[in-house]
Image (cartoon, rainbow, N blue to C red):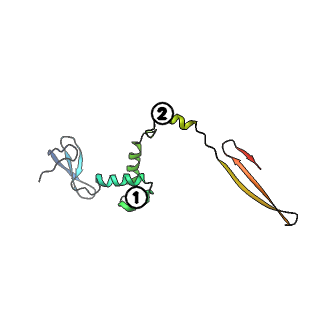
Amino acid sequence: MYISCPSCLSHNIKKNGHTYYGKQNHQCKECFRQFVLNNTHSKSEGLKGLIKQALKERLSLRAICRIFGVSLNWLYSFAQSHWKQIPKNLGIPSHIVERIKRVQLFGVQMDELWSFVQMNLAIAWFFWQFNLERLEHYI
């Protein structure tokens, strides 16, 4: 049985002790990479592709862990490495970014307040507006 290195595919391999779990550890003499045969901890590229799609669908991280049977720590590190590859401008041309910056969005919050006036005979309604952008309020 020939053992080949997963990185450089060399057959120049030596035994390199055992792992904590008792499995035989190997080391490539060409690139010095250490590896274990039939490692069950590595994830296949197909599974990683499915997890990338699930991240794009905005599923919760815990739901992805339950669906694909991966640990939360592994998913955190995988997601962070995937998110670091995304460009800061999301691939949007700079002239469109400038147009977006010129668009001003503002929000107005309204609330209502009512009170009894003159011994509960008449109800007075008050409307309160608050403009978040200008920090102004109106009654």
Give the total number of marks visible in the rendering.
Answer: 2
Q: Identify whether 94 is placed above or below 114.
A: above
Q: Amino acid at mark 1?
A: Ile
Which residue corresponds to the image point at 67% horizontal and 51% vertical from the top-left?
A: 109
Image mark for residue 64: 1
**Disc 2, SS:** helix
Question: Which percent across, then down, holds residue 20?
Answer: 28, 56
- Which residue in the rendered view is the most extreme toward the top? 95
At 42% from the left edge and 51% from the top edge, which residue is drawn?
A: 56
- Residue in view at x 61 percent, y 43 percent: 105
Q: Is residue 33 shown left or right of residue 11?
A: right
Q: Earlier in the sequence, mark 2 or mark 1?
A: 1
On the rendered structure, is 128 left or right of 118? left
Element carrying mark 1: helix
Residue furthest to the bottom? 120
Tell me where residue 88 appears, x and y as whole percent.
45, 39
- State whether residue 114 is above or below residue 79: below
Report the mark closest to the observer, 2 or 1. 2
Q: Residues within 10 Å of mark 2 (few under 14, many from 20)?
A: few
Query: Looking at numbered disc 2 in the image, what kind of residue is underneath it?
Result: Ser
Residue 59 pos. (x, y %): 44, 57
Q: In front: 106, or 75?
A: 106
Question: Cα distance, mark 2 to mark 1?
Answer: 34 Å
Badges 2 and 1: C-beta atoms under 8 Å apart? Answer: no
Query: Percent from the top left, x then y, of residue 55?
Result: 41, 53
Residue at point 50% right, 36% down? Answer: 97
Q: Which mark is residue 30?
A: none
**Residue assigned mark 2:** 94
